[in-house]
Image: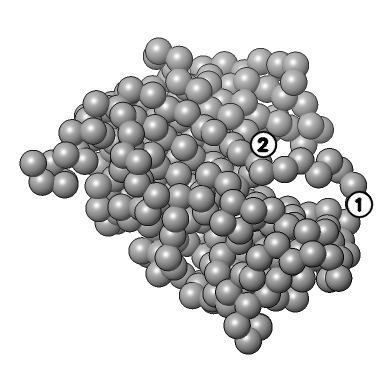
């Protein structure tokens, strides 16, 4: 059996969706401590020291070579970064580290990821957004933000017990502003599951789960939702998605066709933050400008059928 047929068979048998956030170490809420996820060793001749303590005179645990990626990074506020390298935890001077995706990405990148990826780059991150396990097939996605106004989303698909991905995909763009603009979620149907990627300035893209190729893209003109989006996917693959500037849901078929765009003149429905499918209706939770919460219901043609205040 070919890899594609074997992989497709596993995907067709998928039954479980699970999100598994993971953090290597809890530092608490002390001032000066900031999580920065995975980083790459840069600006050294050959290697840097992984120290036992946040002190350059403490015992060296390992030599970390130039270009190596360390995981579960946390700035400790003293110029050192707590991190993990080949299963060992320690500290490296921050001046020798930078976000691992910057080397290849620059300010903008979209497409197959040009960086070498391994499983630990995904499962060791505290902000893993997507972890889809179905009979040994895992789809993982991490979101990254940086102080220079850049955000990135990196996806990887892993078959069986593989520690290297079958394919990876990366988006790196200038930060969209107040809210996170990049997200990923599972779309398609149970028989043909796919990966969805959304960005408020690029629109919605479906990726083939087996190959990672872009199957279709809806431009922001067709899917103008802004950042901070919320979504739900029906059994027949219809995506109901909203966003900060929507603010009302848009229905998109599994083939990438906009089925309808809901409208409402109710001024209380400003910021949608959750979407759910309930038999013959779509339920969307909103916050108003006064930070009150409301539940709005739409029928499957996008008509608003009711609004009620809710406690949050």
**Quadrant in which residue 80 is drawn:** bottom right
Q: Mark 1 points at which residue?
A: 31
Vertical placement of residue 51 versus 233, above or below: below
Residue 249 lies, in percent from the top left, at 49, 34
- Say which residue appears at 78% left-offset and 54% top-offset: 34
Residue 114 lies, in percent from the top left, at 40, 69
Residue 178 lies, in percent from the top left, at 70, 54
* Residue 202 visible within the image: no
Tell me which numbered mark, 1 or 2, is placed earlier along the sequence: 1
- Could you tell me how far apart the alpha carbons at marks 1 and 2 are, in whole angstroms? 34 Å
Residue 178 appears left or right of 203: right
Residue 100 appears left or right of 170: right
Of residues 278 and 208, the one drawn nearer to the viewer in this rendering = 208
* Residue 84 visible within the image: yes
- Say which residue appears at 71% left-offset and 31% top-offset: 287
Q: In which quarter of the image is the N terminus?
A: top left
Residue 270 numbered mark, or none: 2
Crowd class of label 2 (few under 14; some 14 to 19; many from 20; radius 10 Å): many
| CB contact under 8 Å: marks 1 and 2 | no
């Amino acid at each position: 059996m070919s890899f594609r047929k074997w992989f497709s068979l596993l995907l067709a048998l998928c039954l479980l969706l699970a999100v598994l956030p993971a953090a290597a170490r809890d530092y608490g809420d002390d001032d000066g401590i900031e999580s920065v996820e995975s980083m790459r060793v840069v600006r050294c001749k050959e290697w840097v020291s992984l120290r036992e303590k946040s002190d350059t005179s403490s015992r060296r645990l390992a030599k970390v070579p130039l270009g190596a990626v360390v995981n579960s990074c946390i700035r400790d506020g003293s110029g050192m970064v707590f991190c993990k390298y080949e299963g060992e935890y320690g500290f490296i001077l921050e001046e020798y580290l930078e976000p691992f995706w910057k080397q290849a990405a620059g300010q903008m990148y979209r497409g197959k990821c040009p960086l070498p990826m391994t499983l630990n780059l995904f499962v060791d991150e505290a902000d893993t957004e997507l972890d889809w396990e179905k009979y040994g097939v895992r789809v993982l996605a991490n979101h990254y933000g940086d102080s220079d106004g850049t955000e990135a989303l990196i996806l990887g698909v892993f078959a069986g017990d593989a520690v290297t991905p079958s394919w990876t995909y990366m988006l790196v763009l200038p930060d969209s502003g107040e809210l996170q603009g990049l997200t990923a979620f599972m779309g398609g149907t149970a028989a043909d599951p796919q990966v969805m990627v959304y960005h408020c300035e690029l629109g919605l893209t479906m990726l083939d789960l087996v190959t990672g190729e872009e199957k279709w893209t809806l431009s922001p003109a067709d899917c103008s939702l802004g950042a901070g989006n919320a979504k739900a996917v029906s059994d027949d693959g219809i995506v109901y998605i909203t966003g900060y500037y929507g603010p009302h849901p848009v229905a998109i078929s599994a083939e990438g066709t906009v089925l309808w765009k809901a409208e409402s003149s109710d001024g209380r429905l400003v910021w949608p933050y959750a979407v759910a499918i309930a038999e013959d209706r779509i339920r969307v939770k909103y916050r108003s400008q006064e930070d009150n919460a409301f539940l709005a219901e739409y029928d499957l043609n996008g008509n608003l059928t009711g609004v009620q205040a809710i406690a949050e």
